[in-house]
Amino acid sequence: MQPPVAEPVVGEAVDDGGVGSSGLAEAEFDKAGWGSCGDDAIMQQEASIMASEAERVPLVGFKEPLSSLEAEYESGSPILLNKIKMLGEKYANIRRTRGDGNCFFRSFMFSYLEHVLETQDEVEINRISGNIEQCKKTLQSLGYADFTFEDFFSLFMELLDNVPRGKETSISLEELESRCRDPLVSDYVVMFFRFITAGEIRNRAEFFEPFLFDMGSVDQFCKSSVEPMGAESDHIHITAISDALGVPVRVEYLDRSSCDMGPQCANHHDFIPSVCQPSNDTVNPFITLLYRPGHYDILYPK
Amino acid sequence: MQASRARLFKEYKEVQREKSADPDIQLVCDDSNIFKWTALIKGPTETPYEGGVFQLAFVIPEQYPLSPPQVRFLTKIFHPNVHFKTGEICLDILKNAWSPAWTLQSVCRAIIALMAHPEPDSPLNCDSGNLLRSGDVRGFRSMARMYTRLAAMPKKG
């Protein structure tokens, strides 16, 4: 039997000075300050980064004129400035969300609820309630225990129920803003959407699997990139939630890439739920998001 | 706080209802504090932990289930991903990959799976990790087996 090799360990490794190591080595190890580099220290540092981001941007920000976006890129790349100018022709306002990995779901939440609050569209409320009921059955059939998701569902349903006017519990736009900024409400709704998204991806695993490339199986993807809070969203998440809830979403892309329409035009992509596709009517998404690499905010058309 | 209490109460009822569903896990809530649990888990078969019974301590944060429970081994165990002194466990679902879709029960199952499939490349116990990384499976198994006998098996007689 060969003795254990004392090679240096990289990555998250933390030597505990466990079995076999001398007390002296341990003391030197602590002196070097590496003893505080454990997972807890890493999580603490992440928390402090989150906290400084939290001071800068609320979970859901205020409606700002689009010119505030231009100001951000004052000395930025001409491609970006040009794209912002083009966005300015179509959009009047932007509402920022916090960059905590939940920005897509947070933007989706606010944009959707603001839309139904402003339109008072009872038909839409009934329609989405039906889809949500279906999503619940999907999760049950996939083997999720009710108690793991029901609290998140009921919180969203409560919020949706407060949107129509003329009830004792009705809320104003200001009230909706403040609830979506309250982590106790906002994070629960984000988690509700994460359950819906994971349920849809798992339920249509054959459809989604080819899009995962090197991200593992559908189960691994849901466990690492959908279900945990703070896991960032991309095309797959947006397609899934749009399909599951039957809500079309438009995403405007603001990056340095050029598109086929010419070298310097902002391009967008519409996520149209599969149920809408057979009809020939053009579907006009009422949720429009601005994507900048790694982040989503809400856009308001003119 | 209210939400976490309500969720834990549902988990408590589920555990009572499904008591015999998983004979390898015995999850018990503290008599006076629903935020403190302990679990007894059986070492998986065909591993050096077979025949051992390991105790885990759970401390549940107020933000549960949005935040993960803190779990550590109370029983000493020789495993690459468990701190030899504190019992801290290096498992993604207890850190960044946590989701409310997990339950205390399924966390126990994940820990049993970790016992059967150590990840020597992210060790909390480097001696244990190095044995596996250097290919000394026999050395690893005999150390792990020794600690299972010493710490996780009921004394006879």
Image (cartoon, helix red, strand yellow):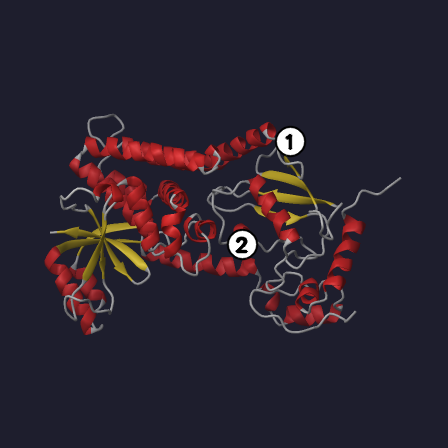
Bin the neighbour count of mark 1 within 10 Å (Cα to Cα): few under 14, some 14-19, many 20 and up.
few
The answer, for residue A59, to whether it is visible in the render is no
Three-letter code, disc 1:
Ser
Residue A39 at x, y percent in the picture: 55, 59
The secondary element bearing badge 1 is classed as loop
Left or right: where does residue A191 sit relative to residue B131? left
Chain-order first, disc 1 or disc 2: 1
Q: Which residue is mark 2?
A: B92
Residue A32 at x, y percent in the picture: 62, 72
Quadrant for residue A88, please give it.
bottom left
Residue B89 at x, y percent in the picture: 62, 53
Q: Identify the residue at horizontal 28%, vertical 30% (top origin).
A: A161
The answer, for residue B60, to whether it is visible in the render is yes
Judging depth in this view, the residue of A19 and B145 nearest the camera is B145
Q: Identify the residue at horizontal 16%, vertical 46% (top origin).
A: A284
Give the chain letter at badge 1. Answer: B
The secondary element bearing badge 2 is classed as helix
Q: Which mark is residue B20?
A: 1
Q: Identify the residue at horizontal 58%, vertical 61% (top origin).
A: A38
Judging depth in this view, the residue of A160 and A166 nearest the camera is A160
* Residues at discs 1 and 2 in contact (Cβ within 8 Å): no
Q: CA distance from mark 1 to mark 2?
A: 28 Å
Three-letter code, disc 2:
Asp
Q: Which mark is residue A121?
A: none
Left or right: where does residue B24 sit relative to residue A106? right
Give the chain letter at badge 2. Answer: B
Badges 1 and 2, same chain: yes
Q: Identify the residue at horizontal 65%, vertical 68% (top origin).
A: A30
Nearer mark to the viewer, of 1 and 2: 1
Relative height, residue A116 to residue B116 (above, below): above
- For the N terminus of chain A, give its image quadrant: bottom right
Judging depth in this view, the residue of B124 and A242 nearest the camera is A242
